[in-house]
Image (cartoon, rainbow, N blue to C red):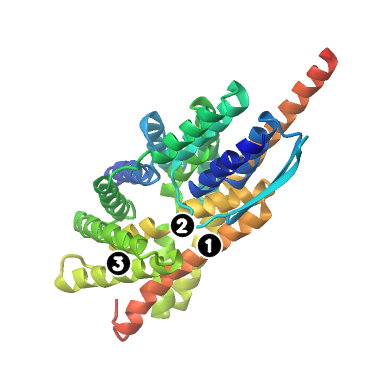
Amino acid sequence: MMNSEIMQIFAAFIGSFGFAILYNIRGKKLAFAALGGFLSWSLFLILEFMIESEPIRYFIVSATTTLYSEIMARVLKTPTTTFITTALIPLIPGGSLYYTMANAFEGNLESFLINGIITLKLAMALALGVVVVTALVKLIYAWNNKKNNKRLDKNL
Amino acid sequence: MKEHFDTIMDIGEQMLLCGAEIHRVEDSIERMGLALGATDIDVFIITSSMVVTIHTPEGSFTQTRRIKNSGTDIDMLHKLNQLSRDICGKKLTFDDIKLRFAEITKAKKYPLWAEVISYVFIAGAFALFFGGKINDALVSAILGIVLRFVVLFIDKFDINKIFGKLICAFIATVLSFTAMKIGFIQSIDKVMIGNIMLLVPGVGLTNALRDLFVGDSVSGLLRLIEAVLAALAIAAGYFLFIFLSGGASL
């Protein structure tokens, strides 16, 4: 069991690295983008011991990964897109998407519905994680700017 | 200011072509415009079009740009972002800006062989990731190579992107089915998933969401629809093979 998990993490890293190349990410950013995929899937597997619900785990991992991307973007002075697009790759529910499709064709209504709902839930959880953190970061920045502007006004 | 207008538009256009968030491009254009001497600036951008009016003491000027074929080029985006920061902070001269912009757009992407290798990595890795065995990963990786060349062909003949996804999915299905018939793999699902990961519009979806929730609803919706269409096209490519083969059992 442990073996397959190590392989998954490794595969997540390689997969993210591959996408980072396709998106023309270079240098230090390439390393941190691929590392993001590695970390996101590791976190997902660790959370498996604590949280049973897969969508909730997806949400937590996606939120954490978005936070990682926002932080790395500030550290390396580059757009957040650099990290978020690659680090979230392992979370794309490609598997359940395929099974939804295959079952739809084969006419297994029940499996189609089950897989379809899983895909939808995971995609929603993933989206929610990204959205919540993005919105929070924007909010904090707006708040900070306001504070700074007030200070400027006072000094004038 | 007037002489800078073209350059600012070029920078913004190039950022969009690299797959930047709308919010970032609007913000950059606004900042650059104001830094270069506009008294006020109105910017409206969606994924496929830019409309910018600058107000200067000499009068107001408007330019529009039509944006086609945007992709993802993070390195160029990073450099354009840096250039726009420098324009605002360092008071670059007109020639400096021109020169740096020309340099940035000339920068190359990774060579084709590197992209082929990443297709191999991605397709192989995700076949394993979703529980495939080593033979699934190998077949998937080889299909990855084929897909890269299919994409090359699609780009060369300027085939519509959504239709391109359909072609890719169709070819991937045909080949994985063939591999199963020959007996390299027991079932096609892991191989298909490995290759679907190459086609799934992951960036499109994340960008769509980020645009939607920072207030760029129009662009967000456009990108969302593009992502959904791409996903449907993948499914259509898969179905196409099944229909043509007369419903071959999987």
Q: Position of residue A149 (x, y in %)?
A: 78, 23
- Chain letter for mark 2, please: B
Distance (Cα) linking label 3 and label 2: 16 Å
Q: CA distance from mark 1 to mark 3?
A: 21 Å
- Residue pointed to by mark 2: B201
Please name the amino acid that badge 2 sits on. Pro
Residue identifier under label 3: B172
Q: Are marks 1 and 2 in contact (CB under 8 Å)?
A: yes
Front residue of this view, candidates B206 and B7: B7
Q: Is residue A156 above or below residue B191?
A: above
**Front disc: 1 or 3:** 1
Given this view, does label 1 or label 2 mark the residue nearer the observer?
Answer: 1
Could you tell me residue A114's position as x and y percent?
A: 49, 68
Query: In the image, residue A142 lies at what x, y percent?
Result: 72, 32
**A122 lies left or right of B107:** right
Whether residue A48 is visible, yes or no, is no
Asked which secondary structure carries label 3, the reply is helix
Horizontal side, residue B64 vs residue B171: left or right? right
Considering every residue shown, the one lying at the far bottom of the view is: B246
Disc 1 is placed on an element classified as helix
Q: Which residue shows up at 36% across the image and 56% down it?
A: B198
**The C terminus of chain B, quarter of image:** bottom left
Q: Hey, what amino acid is under mark 3?
A: Ala
